[in-house]
Image (cartoon, grey):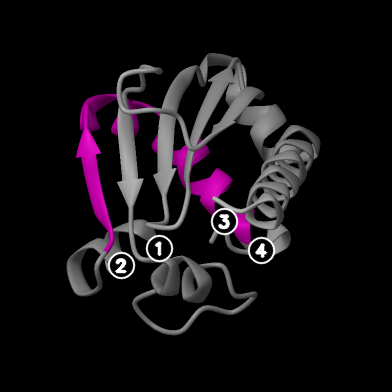
């Protein structure tokens, strides 16, 4: 990865953390929202660790055995860019629509995803403020 790409990925991660931690909905609903998940764009992977609704850490491009997580949300960079638009096109507006009709995949312990679904969905909605992670 180039230095410029690494800086861009780290800037996005910091912005995502700040916007997430300032979000009133995540503060209101996040008391029991604790998990680790991966946002995989094909270009970068972001391991997001959440504890009681606050982003504890974001690891950019962790090694395959370096970090543990419960589930991953994987899609092409193009899908993430469309998903992150202020008003997404049809079928890019949510994780299930993008999973059924586009190239988004949900992997891992999906029970943890479902237990935290409203907060995870809200986190992904915040991509419309922070821009695409790709």
Query: Mark 3 vs mark 2: which is more N-terminal?
Result: 2
- Name the magenta segment's main secondary structure: helix
Which segment is the magenta one?
104-127
Provide the residue designation for mark 2. Answer: 98
Q: Mark 2 and mark 1 in contact (Cβ < 8 Å)?
A: yes
Q: CA distance from mark 1 to mark 2?
A: 6 Å
Q: CA distance from mark 3 to mark 2?
A: 16 Å
Q: Mark 3 and mark 4 in contact (Cβ < 8 Å)?
A: yes
Q: CA distance from mark 3 to mark 1?
A: 16 Å
Q: Mark 2 and mark 3 in contact (Cβ < 8 Å)?
A: no
Does the rendering let one see residue 121? yes
Label 1 sits on a secondary structure element that is loop
Provide the residue designation for mark 1. Answer: 94
**Residue 133: image tag:** 3
Query: Mark 3 vs mark 1: which is more N-terminal?
Result: 1
Q: CA distance from mark 4 to mark 3?
A: 7 Å
Question: x, y percentage for residue 37?
Answer: 41, 31
Q: Name above or below for residue 90 compared with residue 108.
A: below
Dot in front, 3 or 1: 3
Task: From the viewer's perspective, tell me whether residue 109 is left or right of residue 71.
Answer: left
**Residue 16: image tag:** none
Residue at 50% over, 17% down: 34
Question: x, y percentage for residue 96?
Answer: 28, 59
Question: x, y percentage for residue 19?
Answer: 76, 44
Residue at 39% over, 17% down: 66
Q: CA distance from mark 1 to mark 4?
A: 15 Å
Dot in front, 4 or 2: 4
Q: CA distance from mark 4 to mark 2?
A: 17 Å
């Amino acid at each position: 990865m180039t230095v410029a790409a690494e800086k861009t990925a780290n800037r996005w991660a910091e912005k995502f953390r700040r916007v997430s931690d300032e979000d009133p909905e995540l503060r209101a609903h996040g008391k029991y929202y604790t998990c680790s998940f991966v946002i995989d764009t094909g270009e970068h992977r972001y391991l997001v660790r959440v504890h009681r609704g606050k982003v504890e850490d974001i690891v950019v491009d962790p090694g395959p055995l370096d970090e543990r997580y419960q589930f991953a949300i994987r899609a092409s960079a193009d899908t993430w860019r469309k998903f992150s638009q202020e008003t997404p096109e049809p079928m890019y507006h949510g994780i299930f629509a993008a999973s059924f009709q586009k190239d988004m995949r949900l992997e891992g312990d999906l029970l943890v995803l479902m237990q935290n679904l409203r907060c995870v969905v809200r986190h992904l909605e915040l991509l419309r403020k922070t821009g695409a992670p790709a």
